[in-house]
């Protein structure tokens, strides 16, 4: 089937968006559209320029015989800033207050467009880390973990607090919940994680960090490495911070149950994003 | 900012893909690109033709002042056929056999690209039903539910088997697990579902259908309607079929633990897709 440029642009955009972080050889497109590589290169330049201009991400070109093009999803700093501000506003609504000072977030975590945007933000921060798999703990972190993993093109593994016959043999550890100080168990199917994997930990909420510390201990059992930690909401004012290095989008600064007042601020996202380690080129002005 | 057609095509494709089942007024694009509506219409025609030709979906044009354009994701019948055949092959691998005749599917459900493709298939089958929300039960069905919901642009609600303080007040029911005949409890946060909603039920596995029947009973408590039922894998040979109307992608016809033989066939997907009720225009030849 022969394609005009306009049709190619639409189809290539669709293809690249559905294959983030994957190296696509130019021959794949030139064969698919029966077009010269030079035309494909021109198409990719247009896509790259538009993606960058519109804050969708960028296309990396890898030269040589084994080369090709790779789509790196990236959220622009100002878009991220605005989205996090919106999240803060949504989370600060007094009707979210539940008995015990807990917050109802089920509606936000139940909206795919919000979840996917959160996924794109984390994929931006961690885009130049070596990541083989995203890990989370059941249940609330699951949609976030998938949203990040889809953007990074890696699988998800889910840690459970109860054993299921459908997972086969498991590795379990005991950990101390940071806030309640109770000893709990978490486990992961043996088959689900290869030894030596680089693992990005994603969760919805971090209080003292006990659950995340538990996941880190579990990773040690698999001789795996923590490639990064991302949480949607962290709470402030915890004396003993169990986890040092993490990215949070939102910080719960203060919850006043009596006054029904929730004080929410920006998390560590921009602190982390702006350090060299993560790659400041992500956020430089174009 | 002024756009050339090529840049518009790339950006509009990205926008439409990220906003399935949403009506986008032409003025949105003509203002964004400072282009005449006639040019935008031509762009949309190119995108529509490419989407249909490449099996991405279609664009519906709604005429009039309150009109606009809507992207309906659709997987072509031959692509769906091939994907389901691949799934059958993947699932039939003898190393998936666990003690008790259970199957290890965690790796497939942990791969976002597979999960998202499954989501697109279900979104195709249910594309012309009125659906307000996708419902599933924790844990394994969650990624599938989000994948479908993202394609239909609706929220997800998650039924749990244990109560969580972070969900506020809940409605619970008792149900009989179809295979084990044990009485179990499932519950849903009161806030999470509006009365009278049209609900699409999605799950990973259906044996006798007890869990899905439980979800249907729970929906009655919310005066909600079942808009459809989709499961990834159904097992065959259950005497008492609790659930009559559902779409399955894959059918586990026979598991021979001794011979380590798993027999897997196509589910009800094409039976359902080919009935008038669902809309045969989805699969007619173009």
Image: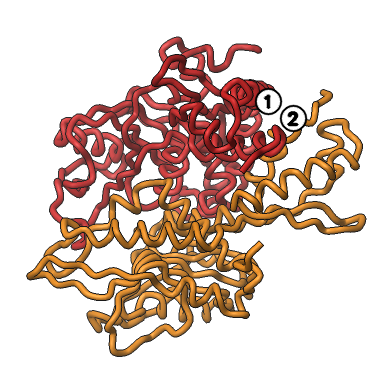
Chain colours: A red, B orange
Is B170 in front, or is B178?
B178
Q: Residues within 10 Å of mark 1 (few under 14, many from 20)?
A: many
Quarter of the image for the C terminus of chain A: give it.
top right
Q: Position of residue A231 (x, y in %)?
A: 43, 35
Q: Nearer the viewer, residue A63 or A271?
A: A63
The dot on residue B280 is none
Residue B117 visible somewhere in the drawing = yes
Q: With A182 as the anchor, is B196 left or right in this view? A: right
Q: Residue furthest bottom?
A: B240
Q: According to the image, label 2 marks what residue?
A: B6
**A262 shown above or below B257:** above
Marks 1 and 2 close (CB-CB < 8 Å)? yes
Residue B10 picture quarter: top right
Classify the position of the N terminus of chain A by image quarter.
Answer: top right
| Front label number (1 vs 2) | 2
Q: Which residue sits at x=41%, y=32%?
A: A230
* Label 2 secondary element: helix
For label 1, the residue is: A50
Between the C-alphas of marks 1 and 2, the distance is 9 Å
In the rendered image, residue B98, in percent from the top left (x then y), is placed at 15, 62
When the figure is inspected, residue A69 is found, relative to residue B9, above or below; the finding is above
Name the secondary structure under disc 1: helix
Chain letter for mark 2, please: B
Asked whether A267 or B1 is in front, the reply is B1
Using the image, determine if residue A78 lies above or below residue B256: above
Instruction: Name the residue rendered at 16%, 44% in the picture.
Output: A174
Nearest to the observer: residue B148 or residue A179: B148
Residue A22 left/right relative to B48:
left
Outermost residue to the top: A276
């Amino acid at each position: 089937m022969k394609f005009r440029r306009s049709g190619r642009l639409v189809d290539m955009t669709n293809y690249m968006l559905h294959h983030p972080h994957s190296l696509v050889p130019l021959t794949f497109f030139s064969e698919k559209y029966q077009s010269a590589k030079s035309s494909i290169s021109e198409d990719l330049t247009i896509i790259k320029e538009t993606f960058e201009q519109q804050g969708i991400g960028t296309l990396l070109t890898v030269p040589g015989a084994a080369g090709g093009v790779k789509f790196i999803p990236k959220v622009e700093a100002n878009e991220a800033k605005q989205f996090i501000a919106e999240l803060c506003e949504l989370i600060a609504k007094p009707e979210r207050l539940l008995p015990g000072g807990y917050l109802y977030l089920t509606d936000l975590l139940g909206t795919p467009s919000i979840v996917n945007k959160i996924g794109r933000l984390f994929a931006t921060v961690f885009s130049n880390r070596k990541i083989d798999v995203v890990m989370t703990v059941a249940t609330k972190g699951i949609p976030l973990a998938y949203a990040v993993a889809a953007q990074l093109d890696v699988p998800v593994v889910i840690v459970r607090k109860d054993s299921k016959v459908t997972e086969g043999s498991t590795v379990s550890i005991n950990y101390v919940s940071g806030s309640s100080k109770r000893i709990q168990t978490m486990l992961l199917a043996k088959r689900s994680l290869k030894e030596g994997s680089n693992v990005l930990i994603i969760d919805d909420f971090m209080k003292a960090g006990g659950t995340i510390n538990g996941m880190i201990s579990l990773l040690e059992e698999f001789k795996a490495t923590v490639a990064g930690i991302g949480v949607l909401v962290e709470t402030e004012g915890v004396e003993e911070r169990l986890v040092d290095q993490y990215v949070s989008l939102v910080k719960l600064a203060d919850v006043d149950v009596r006054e029904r007042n929730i004080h929410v601020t920006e998390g560590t996202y921009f602190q982390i994003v702006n350090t060299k380690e993560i790659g400041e080129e992500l956020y430089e002005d174009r």
